[in-house]
Image: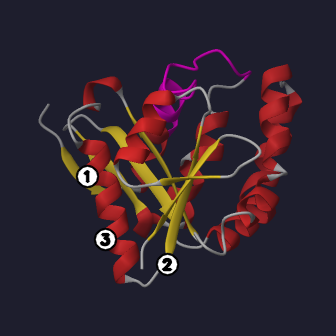
Amino acid sequence: MNATLRRSEPRDADALTRICLLTGSSGADATGRYSDDRVLGDIHAVPYAVRDPHWAWVVDNGSGAKGYLVATPDTTAFEAWFIESWWPERDAVYRANANAETLSLIDGVQRRRDDAALFAETYPAQLHINLLDDLRGGGWGRTLIETLVEQLRAEGVPGLHLVASLDNENAQRFYEKLGFERLESAGGAAYGMLLG
């Protein structure tokens, strides 16, 4: 596939939400799983691109984004902003018509700051990455992460972490292949990389 890597732009918000949804069930399509198909994007993708656009990239095939990497160099500051500014209004909207699975997801949002504190001192940067099927296996995941790592190193950020689904074994193998080390975590498959 002919595609290019570029910085995410505000016009990409719907594409980020769509990609997050189509990969939101351990790499598979989560359409219809939650009471509102936008909720995953509003938790795991769009807020990063809104707050830290300098740390957000998309892979664009000419008809829009088909994959993304969003990140923050300072998880502690990001999570404070997320909980205090980004999420409250959205929480009320999503909670109003939530099914049980959506309630479980949005209740987990309140634990984000505590979860982030487990890794933020050693691995202050955090990333989320998703690619649609036609981009997988083409080197774009590696390119996105290497681009982020290079920028983090240039800015003196000492470490990077992420949390993958325990069910997504393909993603776990991918992160390990790129040099991430498994971290102890109560929920999800956490990985870290020291950048110094």
As drawn, 179 above or below 170: below
Q: Is residue 117 found left or right of 137 in the rendered image? A: right
Would you say 168 lies left or right of 104 here? left
Q: Name the residue under label 3.
A: 150
Tell me the mark number nearer the camera, choosing from 2 and 1.
Answer: 2
- Of residues 89 and 67, the one nearer the viewer is 67
Q: x, y (%) of residue 68?
A: 39, 46
- Percent x, y of residue 18: 48, 31
Question: Of the residues tagged 3 and 2, which is closer to the observer?
Answer: 2
Query: Which residue is tagged 2?
Result: 158
Residue 51 seen in the figure: yes
Residue 19 falls within the magenta-colored stretch: yes
- Residue of label 1: 143
Which residue in the rendered view is the most extreme toward the top?
Answer: 32
What's the residue type where badge 2 is placed? Pro
Is 70 inside the magenta-drawn segment? no
Task: Give, as a single range, the part of the protein colored magenta.
Answer: 17-35
Q: Which of marks 3 and 1 is nearer the N terminus?
A: 1
Using the numbered discs, state the Cα–Cα distance from disc 3 to disc 2 in whole angstroms: 12 Å
